Amino acid sequence: MKKMLIVYQLRAREFDNALLLKTIFENNGYIVSIKNDADTFCLFEKFDFIIWPCMYDNNQFDTLSYRFNSCGVPSISMRYEQIFTKHDEDTGVMAPKGKAQDIPTMNWGIADYNYCKMNGVPDKNLSVTGFITLDYLRPEFSGFWYNRDDIADRYNLSKDKKWLLFISSFALADNVEVAKTLYTYQEGEDAISISDLNTRSRKEILEWLENLILDDKSYNIIYRPHPAEKSDINLFSDLKKKYPNNFHVIPELNIKQWILTTDIITTWVSTSITECYVAKKHCLVLRPEPYPQKYDIVLYKDGKFITNYDEFKLEIENSSKQKDFKENFPISSDILNRYYDISDTPTYLRIVNEVEKHINDNPENEINRAQWLIKRWKYLIFKGYILKIYLKRIYQFTHKNFHFSIRDARLRKKYAIQTWEDEAVNKAFNKNDEENKLKKLKSMVNMYGNIK
């Protein structure tokens, strides 16, 4: 049997998708492994095909390929980020470059297909498959998700209160260094101002959420931080202490789980508004300050935004009364349909067909194995990846078992120590979560036959 590897980056964003593909491919006779790109590697394990989370440039090609592709087998990219700013689209900065253009790439919609093609990716390496994460919102997956009671018990949430979800996108709040990397352009735009906008907007939205609690104690506020957002800041700690029964910061679980379970959904600039649209759940877009159009996500062009607390409170009170879902949705369905190809054929089946096409027809991907192995070992040794990963594992072990913790703020920020600690603490839950979800998916495959 052929062996396949699926590599993922962010658990909350990608892991459920990897589990679905694993289930389908195993039902088709493959042996499938799933590994995280940040905390593991494959020294000697061999695969016949690899699915990457994304592939942007030579550096990422080398980093992923030399760590996981032990003998240079063919691969394909899921390209997990395909919704960008107007500036990103105009400059082509987020398109695959260099060796990454040689990796077949799956596009969510015609917009990204054209974007990649215009920026040099060969047409033969592009295919529109749709976005697999939206498959989980299809009716046949209704039994996959935890119910409200399960989540309430897990996170100590009141079952009787109204659940209000805020989907955060404040990755750059108090994070000037990352902002400088993303927003330093030839036009001389001030990267610090983008980080400051994140910081100010988050502060004001948190004030709105606090005011809502003060006005009405019947709300459970669930703040879902962005994966790159620091979740141990004082702003969160203070609110959790003041309102332990009303304010919760929860980074775990797939965002679709929260969208399907909560009563009211709000966001600032998250692309997860697409999941709200497909799930037919209304979403309020909170914008205390205008976002520079040049740097705004393209989905939000000409959107309907809430700009002050009084308007926010009124919209929440009226949210249950709105009749026409599409008419009241804050962003354009025409724009959404250009970026997401939503078809009667599930994306996971389109991905399976695309992957098997490349597995069965890849004469161009033949490489000199000996040459590849020499380059690979030189890269792993000189970059020190093996040592770095084992140091991370040692730290997580000592943190979980002996409560050791790095206190230095600079180190915690540089190495995302909070994420390491969360992974260690949640390891048992994540393992149980994985087993439960695989069991459900396998049952669905047995019942529906690849869930067609």
Image (cartoon, rainbow, N blue to C red):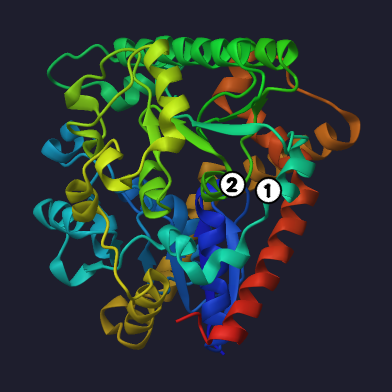
Q: Quadrant of residue 99?
A: bottom left
Kindly identify the amino acid type of the residue bearing the numbered disc 2. Answer: Thr
Q: Position of residue 101 (x, y in %)?
A: 23, 59
Q: Position of residue 174 (x, y in %)?
A: 47, 14
Q: Nearer the viewer, residue 3 or 257?
A: 257
**Direction from residue 368 to residue 150 in the image, left or right:** right
Image height of 238 relative to 159, above or below: above
Disc assigned to residue 138: none
Image height of 401 relative to 117, above or below: above
Give the residue pinned by disc 2. 261
Q: Quadrant of residue 175?
A: top left
Kindly identify the amino acid type of the residue bearing the numbered disc 1. Answer: Arg
Disc assigned to residue 148: 1
Query: In percent of the image, x 17 and y 59: which residue is there?
Result: 110
Q: Position of residue 114 (x, y in %)?
A: 13, 56
User: Disc 1, disc 2: CB below 8 Å?
Assistant: yes
What secondary structure is found at the residue carrying circle 2?
helix
Q: Quadrant of the N terminus?
A: bottom right
Query: In percent of the image, x 14 and y 21: which residue is there?
Result: 186
Image height of 336 relative to 321, above or below: below
Q: Which is nearer the N-term, disc 1 or disc 2?
A: 1
Does any portion of residue 290 appear in the rendered image?
yes
